[in-house]
Image (spheres, rainbow, N blue to C red):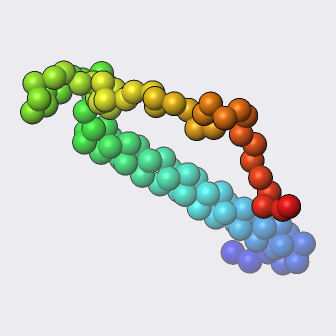
């Protein structure tokens, strides 16, 4: 079916392009959502549950991230007994 009026033909063409563009956009959003959901589902299946307790060779019980091994340093950098330490730009 061809429109005899060039203005009407242009309107129909613009409408078709907009519909095609909208369909491609919807498909892209749906595909991205499905991909994200699939990857999140796989990651959840592979990682242990938060707060799980694991046994180690030393017999100790550690949390998921091994927080028992984290200790503060004996002395903070720059807090020695020689007074305050300032950063230098390298100039004289």
Q: Nearer the viewer, residue 3 or 81?
A: 81
Residue found 37% across the figure and 29% down from its top: 70
Report the label total: 0
- Residue 47 vertical position relative to residue 7 in the rendered view, above or below: above
Lateral position of residue 58 relative to residue 90, left or right: left
Residue found 39% across the figure and 27% down from its top: 71
Is residue 23 visible in the rendered image? The answer is no
Q: Position of residue 37 (x, y in %)?
A: 41, 43
Figure quadrant of residue 91: bottom right
Q: Nearer the viewer, residue 45 or 19?
A: 45
Q: Residue furthest front?
A: 82
Figure quadrant of residue 51: top left
Figure quadrant of residue 16: bottom right
Residue found 59% across the figure and 61% down from its top: 24
Q: Position of residue 29 (x, y in %)?
A: 55, 51
Q: Position of residue 78 (x, y in %)?
A: 63, 37
Q: Position of residue 49 (x, y in %)?
A: 27, 27
Lateral position of residue 52 relative to residue 14, left or right: left
Q: Nearer the viewer, residue 85 or 68?
A: 85
Q: Nearer the viewer, residue 91 or 72?
A: 91
Is residue 11 visible in the rendered image? The answer is yes
Residue found 74% across the figure and 77% down from its top: 2
Quadrant in the picture for the C terminus:
bottom right
- Residue 84 vertical position relative to residue 29 in the rendered view, above or below: above
Quadrant in the picture for the N terminus:
bottom right
């Amino acid at each position: 079916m061809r429109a005899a009026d060039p203005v009407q033909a242009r309107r129909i063409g613009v409408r078709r392009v907009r519909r095609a563009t909208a369909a491609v956009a919807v498909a892209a959003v749906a595909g991205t959502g499905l991909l994200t959901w699939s990857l999140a589902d796989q990651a959840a299946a592979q990682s242990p549950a938060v707060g799980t307790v694991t046994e180690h060779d030393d017999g100790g019980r550690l949390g998921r991230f091994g927080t028992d091994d984290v200790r503060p340093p004996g002395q903070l950098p720059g807090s020695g007994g020689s007074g305050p330490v300032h950063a230098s730009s390298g100039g004289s």
